[in-house]
Amino acid sequence: PAPASANEQFQALAVIEQLWSRWSRDERQYLRSRIRSTDFPPGTGRSARAAGILDLPVEPRPPRT
């Protein structure tokens, strides 16, 4: 398959970030590993969004009581 366009990558990162609290710990670790292995051009919205995701906690928050 053809590689994702820059816009498709950006939109995928946006979805990952928006749904971060719904991903399991294993899913979060997988997504972080995939983001780390992707070479986003420095100074782009994609690299900024990827960096923001990498700063998010891996451990899910405990449920509210």
Image: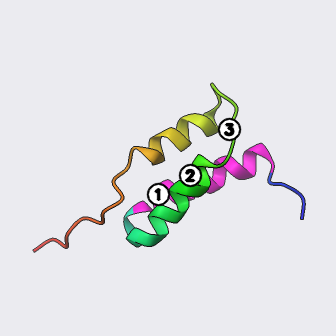
Query: How far across and down, in percent of the image, does residue 46 sit?
Result: 63, 39
Tell me the quarter of the image containing the N terminus.
bottom right
Which mark sits nearer the N-terminus, 3 or 2? 2
Mark 1 and mark 2 in contact? Answer it, CB < 8 Å: yes
For disc 2, the neighbor class at 10 Å (few under 14, some 14 to 19, many from 20) is some
SS of the residue at dot 2? helix
Q: Quadrant of the C terminus?
A: bottom left
Asked which secondary structure carries label 3, the reply is loop
Q: Which residue is mark 2?
A: 14
Q: Which residue is mark 1?
A: 18
The CA span between labels 3 and 2 is 14 Å
Q: Tell me the kind of residue under disc 2.
A: Ala
Q: Is residue 59 magenta?
A: no
- Extreme residue toward the right, this view: 2
Q: Amino acid at mark 1?
A: Gln
- The residue that appears at 80% across and 54% down in the rendered structure is 4
How far is disc 1 from disc 2 in space, using C-alphas?
A: 6 Å
Which mark is drawn over residue 40?
Answer: 3
Tell me the mark number nearer the camera, choosing from 3 and 1. Answer: 3
Q: Are marks 3 and 2 in contact (CB under 8 Å)?
A: no
Q: Is residue 63 shown left or right of residue 60? A: left
Q: Return the residue found at the far top.
A: 43
Magenta includes 6?
yes
Q: CA distance from mark 3 to mark 1?
A: 19 Å
- The secondary structure that most of the magenta stretch takes on is helix
Residue 3 spot, x, y in % from top left: 84, 55
Q: Position of residue 38 (x, y in %)?
A: 67, 47
